[in-house]
Amino acid sequence: MNTVILTLHGPEHKYTIYLRPGAGADWQRAVADIVPANRYLLLADDNMAAHLALPADGERFGNWRCLRVLPGEEHKNLDQYASLVNAALQGGMDRDTVLVALGGGVTGDIAGFVAGTLLRGVRLVQVPTTLLAMVDSSVGGKNGVNTPAGKNLVGTFHQPAAVLIDPSFLDTLPRREYRAGLAEVVKTAVLDNQDFFTRLEDTAPALAAGDHAALADAISTCCWIKGSHVMTDEKDTGMRQLLNLGHTFGHVLESLAGFNGSVVHGEAVSVGTVLATDFAARHGFFDSDGADRIRALLARLGLPTRIAELGRTADAASDIDVSPPDWQALLGSDQAVRALVQDKKSSGGKVNLVLPHGFGDCRVDKGYDAVTVVRFMRDNI
Ligand code: GLY
């Protein structure tokens, strides 16, 4: 099967997102088919590379060369960016070399930043292997790294030359990471009319179980919805900002937890979406039935819906050995207010929040006092 989900036409770019179930078994050929080139530089998530028995870091294979990317938000930083750029240049890449990002959101974001800045920009193919990357981060050209001051504060817009999605990659994903991606699916559905949200409610058990048909529908619908936001507002000055529903609250929680793996991005987005929804309901923008439906769907998909649940997820597959965050103390600190005003949507110490006013009617509501918003979070642990 060779499904073209959509071709994005930005003001300066046009590229296609392919949904090709099974293509992951021969991803090299699929990439070469979609974007032919003489040389490829693969930036591969280290875990995925081990799983697929890919060549070691720096090794060449045919007209490809492999660089391994350390996954995890704690490695999405300027140090790893610098070592990838240096390794790419030392390997003799030129402007015709196509970069290929194989991995999840961290790999795609850092590879995108490398592709957008190396030699002032080279072509990039995104091959997302996590649900979060398939439904969100691989589409739309945003890239970047975290700094001690916050998430994604350094980066560029650099649209990929193509995106190749094979849902079969998800079969090997740790369950916790898979579930985390479902939070972005639910968030995206709230941005659209109720049809997609209702479909997710109907297919929740299939989605939670990783059913391929339910996934193909969810992934392609998310790419359509995201694609329409990106085409209208590539540089994130208006409609695209709505894709950050749940992210302002979520980023504060991730940042307070310390990017140490105790809270993964999708879990923070899940709780952040509930907080945004409850905040909107509290201010009379959104009806409480809608808020209940969103919370119930996230819970049915196995996602946390309260701050208190974050950092306590039992996960035998991971080797996380950190104490659960003390949310009362963290949300009572100045650090929480600082984390909130560092959000890219904040200005002049005031916080702009994406809030639902209905399904398919989210808005950027401006000018909230940061201390009041943090107090709301602390009152809703
Ligand atoms: N993840 C939100 C965006 O790409 O705009």
Image (cartoon, rainbow, N blue to C red):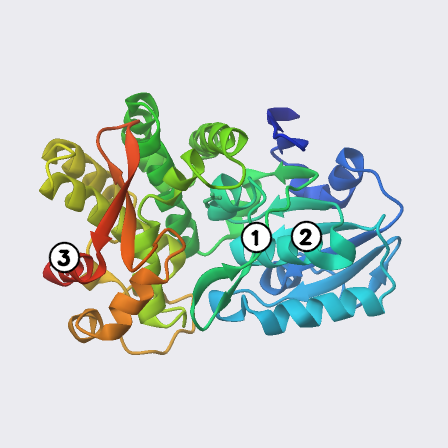
3D distance between C-alphas at marks 3 and 2:
38 Å
Task: Pinpoint residue 105: horizontal percent, then vertical percent.
Answer: 52, 53
Task: Pinpoint residue 317: horizontal percent, then vertical percent.
Answer: 42, 65
Question: Toward the viewer: 206 or 137?
Answer: 137
Q: Which mark is residue 376?
A: 3
Looking at the image, residue 174 sits to the left or right of residue 60; the answer is left
Task: Pinpoint residue 378: horizontal percent, then vertical percent.
Answer: 14, 63
Above or below for 303 versus 310: above
Q: Amino acid at mark 3?
A: Phe
Above or below for 184 versus 285: below
Q: Quadrant of residue 319?
A: bottom left
Crowd tier of the residue under label 3, counting other residues whose Cα lies within 10 Å: few below 14, some 14–19, many 20 or above: some
Q: Amino acid at mark 2?
A: Gly
Above or below for 283 versus 90: above
Label 2 CB sits under 8 Å from any ligand 1 atom: no
Q: Which residue is mark 2?
A: 116
Q: Which residue is mark 1?
A: 143
Crowd tier of the residue under label 1, counting other residues whose Cα lies within 10 Å: few below 14, some 14–19, many 20 or above: many
Please tell me which residue is depicted at 28% across the width and 53% down the height of the picture. 351
Q: Amino acid at mark 1?
A: Asn
3D distance between C-alphas at marks 3 and 1:
31 Å
Q: Sequence-wise, which precedes: disc 1 or disc 2?
A: 2
Asked if the residue at tag 2 contacts the one at tag 1, i.e. Cβ–Cβ closer than 8 Å, the answer is yes
